[in-house]
Structure formats: C-alpha cells, structure tokens
Image (cartoon, rainbow, N blue to C red):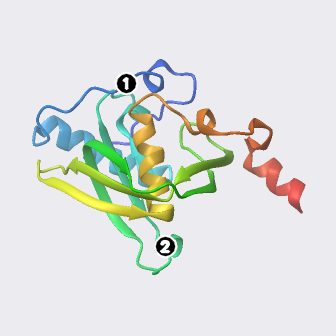
C-alpha cells in the first residue's frame, strides 16, 4: 500500500471528466483502491475520488462517521465504481463542505437530501441503494470530482467561502 499525493484545486486532473473503469476486478484497480483507502485515512478524510490522486478513473471511496448520521450507525467504507446518482425528490439542504483538494477551506453548498446510487463495487458486483442527509452529501461531493466539479463551483455565495481557521476565529 502507498500514500498517494492529493491533487489540489487548479490541477488539470481535477477539471476533466474521469474515464469509466472497464474491469473493476483488474489487479491495478484493486491496488489503486487500497492506496486510496490508505491515502484517505492518512489525510484524514471521509471520502476520496480517483481524480484527487491523479487517476482520471470513475472510482470513489467514502465512509460516514457514526456521529454524522441520525441513527448513530454511520456507513462503512464503501467503494463505488462507475457510480450514477439519481435525485429522489426536490428537498435540498445547505451544509458546509470541505475537501482534501482544497486543504483548510470550507463553504456552504446546497445539495439534494435523498439520492439513489447505482454503481459497481470492487468485485464488479452491482450496488443499488438510497442515501439521505449527510450520507447523500458525501456521495454527491465525491462523485462531483468524477465530472470535474469542485464544491466551490456549487456554492451560491462565494462570500462564505474561506479558510476554516479564519472563519472559526471570526465566529468566536
């Protein structure tokens, strides 16, 4: 396993559309996923898309901490290959987001609260499930990376975009 370098905002790999994965069971894909897991843990983060580690492939990994869900159960480490998102209703919620590709920064983003996810896992098995609230936000944020979208591009008010440390001190 290896800790991979994380691309930062402005790098061309973050601006393009990632290519579909042809064979999720390919050993190179398995190695990439394992390295992404190590990189995410080292960062630390709760989600990571392959373009963030300089690989323009449609792969996302994420987990949801127990304290970020209403039922307190969280969501375990999940691998999504070639994911598709379907918005299930019109409900939208604002939430502050950060990103490993924009270290130390955050800003509010409005996102749909209920989605359906269809993808393949690392063994090529079909996944099809619904996600709500913070879980849905994490998936949407990571899948945006596969289409060259960073969360500031989804912000309606860039006046609320800034460094976490500065914004926290201003609120004290």
Give the side of residue 123 with respect to residue 103, left or right.
left
Give residue 6's position: percent from left, percent from top: 47, 35
Is residue 46 among what the camera can see? Answer: no
Indicate the quadrant where residue 171 lies.
Answer: bottom right
Give the side of residue 125 with respect to residue 141, left or right.
left
Residue that numbered label 1 is attached to: 17
Give residue 126's position: percent from left, percent from top: 14, 52
- Marks 2 and 1, Cα distance to the nearest angstrom? 30 Å
Residue that numbered label 2 is attached to: 69
Residue situated in front as seen by the camera: 27 or 95: 95
Q: Residue furthest front?
A: 90
Give the side of residue 81 with respect to residue 72, left or right.
left
Helix, strand or loop at disc 1? loop
At horizontal 45% and vertical 28% (from top left) the residue drawn is: 148
Name above or below for residue 135 compared with residue 120: below
Give residue 43's position: percent from left, percent from top: 50, 49
At horizontal 23% and vertical 48% (from top left) the residue drawn is: 119
């Amino acid at each position: 396993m290896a800790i991979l370098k994380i691309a930062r905002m402005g790098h061309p790999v973050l601006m393009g559309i990632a290519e579909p994965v042809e064979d999720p069971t390919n050993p190179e894909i398995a190695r990439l996923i394992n390295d992404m897991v190590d990189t995410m843990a080292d960062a630390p983060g709760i989600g990571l898309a392959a373009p963030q580690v300089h690989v323009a492939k449609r792969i996302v990994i994420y987990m949801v901490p127990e304290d970020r869900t209403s039922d307190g159960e969280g969501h375990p480490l999940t691998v999504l290959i070639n994911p598709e998102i379907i918005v299930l209703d019109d409900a939208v919620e604002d939430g502050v987001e950060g990103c490993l590709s924009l270290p130390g920064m955050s800003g509010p983003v409005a996102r749909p609260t209920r989605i359906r996810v269809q993808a393949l896992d690392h063994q090529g098995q079909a996944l099809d499930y619904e996600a709500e609230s913070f879980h849905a936000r994490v998936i949407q944020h990571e899948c945006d990376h596969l289409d060259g979208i960073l969360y500031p591009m989804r912000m309606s008010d860039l006046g609320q975009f800034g460094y976490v440390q500065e914004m926290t001190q201003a609120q004290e």
